[in-house]
Image (tube, rainbow, N blue to C red):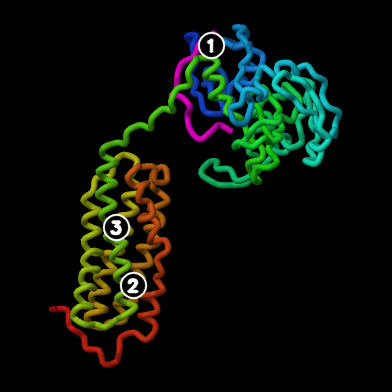
């Protein structure tokens, strides 16, 4: 409903009723977000503009009661670029049309010149005229009304839950200012019947040939309005450069993580083939050394602001890995199964604390370096502690094996 990213950086636009005569706005692909905090509280401290109304009427709003009359926009509502497709100007001529009767199956069509026709074949899609809005005297098409009242998984106050996707049905769209009409426009190079209805803030489209979840869409009205008002559309703002301290921390952390990942893979191989030869113990020593050194290497890092809680929890995890190494060294050199049991407990605690640390990563891994290698942060989540558990609580050490002794 807003688009994947900002279409502009934040900028000031004239608005006579805002402090100093300007208000802070930011354009997205599908809207314009407006700072309204000088006179309203949440959820109305940020509003999205009545862009469709202005593009269709040409009445550009510069204050609560201040307007500048321009020509309506000739940008097309939807579909591939084509000179015959309906535009915002097209819908200017149908704003005053009477609403469809309630329950009416919508088969009316519209061309670029605003001519209204009818195609009975469009009745197969079962779209009807539903909710009447007395404020504008237009009915919302059934597919749009269902979308505006839909619910799903939302994230609020640190939790996921099922709730309405919008504060109210008209929160993101505004009231309807036209009826819904079918347009025949090119989509992906193919002529397609697309239903369109314009509201104050958006023009919604319904393409029955799209996959579920994408049949109702909002047009790129933020882009269209910016070009209509300001001229050439700007390039999306570049992302801010990463904090050098975050990059240095991330690069050093990744060395530790990747070494740990490799050590776990080698440990699995050793347990799968416990030969207890000199070569086997050489590889075992390498793994235990990584587990012991990793804690001190991590402790030497200086976490940047915002990473302190994550770093502290990760340090707790690696302390458990350090302790696991000490127990496993005793266990595998002296064939001490009690030491192996204690080592397994430390290893399982390491995995638990590591999972908690991942949850504390600021912005869920928003650092560019960590993001690139984020799989390293999740490798341990899938680690199967059962491999060593089966070794300890299964056959264990062979009866004829001789302990090499810790002095080696």
Quarter-wise, where is residue 327 in the image? bottom left
What number of labels is visible? 3
- The magenta stretch is 1-16
Query: Which numbered tag is attached to residue 15?
Result: 1
Q: For this rendering, which residue is in front, 218 or 380?
A: 218
Report the mark closest to the observer, 3 or 1: 3
Residue in the picture at 42% in, 61% down: 381
Tell me the residue that label 3 is attached to: 258
Residue in the picture at 38% in, 75% down: 387
Residue 369 vertical position relative to residue 181 in the rendered view, above or below: below
Residue 392 vertical position relative to residue 125 in the rendered view, above or below: below
Q: For this rendering, which residue is in front, 104 or 353?
A: 104
Quarter-wise, where is residue 322 in the image? bottom left
Q: Earlier in the sequence, mark 3 or mark 1?
A: 1
Tell me the residue that label 2 is attached to: 268
Q: In the figure, is residue 264 to the left or right of 206?
A: left
Prevalent SS, magenta region? loop
Quarter-wise, where is residue 117 in the image? top right
């Amino acid at each position: 409903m807003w688009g994947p990213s900002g279409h502009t950086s934040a900028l000031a636009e004239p608005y006579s009723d805002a402090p100093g005569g300007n208000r802070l706005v930011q354009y997205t692909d599908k809207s314009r977000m407006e700072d309204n905090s000088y006179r309203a509280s949440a959820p109305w401290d940020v509003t999205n503009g009545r862009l469709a109304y202005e593009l269709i009427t040409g009445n550009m709003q510069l204050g609560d009661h201040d307007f500048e009359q321009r020509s309506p926009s000739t940008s097309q509502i939807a579909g591939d670029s084509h000179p015959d497709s309906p535009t915002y100007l097209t819908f200017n001529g149908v704003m005053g049309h009477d609403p469809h009767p309630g329950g009416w199956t919508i088969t009316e069509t519209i061309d670029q010149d605003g001519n209204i026709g009818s195609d009975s074949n469009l009745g197969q899609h079962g779209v009807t005229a539903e909710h009447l809005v007395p404020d504008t005297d237009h009915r919302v098409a059934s597919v749009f009304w269902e979308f505006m009242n839909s619910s799903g998984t939302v994230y609020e106050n640190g939790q996921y839950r099922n709730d309405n996707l919008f504060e109210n049905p008209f929160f993101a769209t505004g009231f309807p200012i036209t009826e819904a009409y079918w347009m025949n426009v090119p989509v992906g190079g193919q002529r397609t019947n697309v239903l369109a209805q314009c509201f104050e803030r958006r023009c919604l489209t319904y393409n029955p040939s799209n996959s579920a979840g994408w049949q109702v869409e909002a047009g790129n009205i933020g882009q269209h309005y910016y070009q209509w008002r300001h001229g050439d559309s700007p390039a999306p703002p570049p992302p801010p450069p990463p904090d050098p301290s975050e990059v240095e921390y991330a690069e050093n952390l990744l060395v530790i993580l990747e070494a740990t990942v490799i050590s776990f893979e080698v440990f699995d191989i050793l347990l799968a083939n416990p030969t207890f030869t000199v070569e086997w113990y050489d590889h075992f020593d390498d793994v235990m050394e990584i587990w012991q050194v990793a804690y001190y290497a991590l402790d030497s890092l200086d976490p940047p602001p915002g990473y302190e809680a994550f770093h502290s929890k990760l340090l707790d995890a690696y302390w458990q890995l350090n302790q696991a190494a000490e127990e496993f060294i005793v266990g595998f050199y002296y064939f001490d199964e009690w030491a192996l049991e204690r080592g397994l407990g430390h290893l399982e605690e390491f995995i638990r604390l590591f999972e908690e640390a991942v949850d504390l990563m600021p912005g869920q891994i928003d650092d560019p370096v960590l993001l690139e290698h984020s799989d390293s942060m999740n490798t341990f989540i899938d680690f199967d502690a059962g491999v060593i558990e089966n070794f300890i609580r299964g056959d264990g050490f062979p009866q004829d094996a001789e302990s090499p002794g810790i002095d080696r």
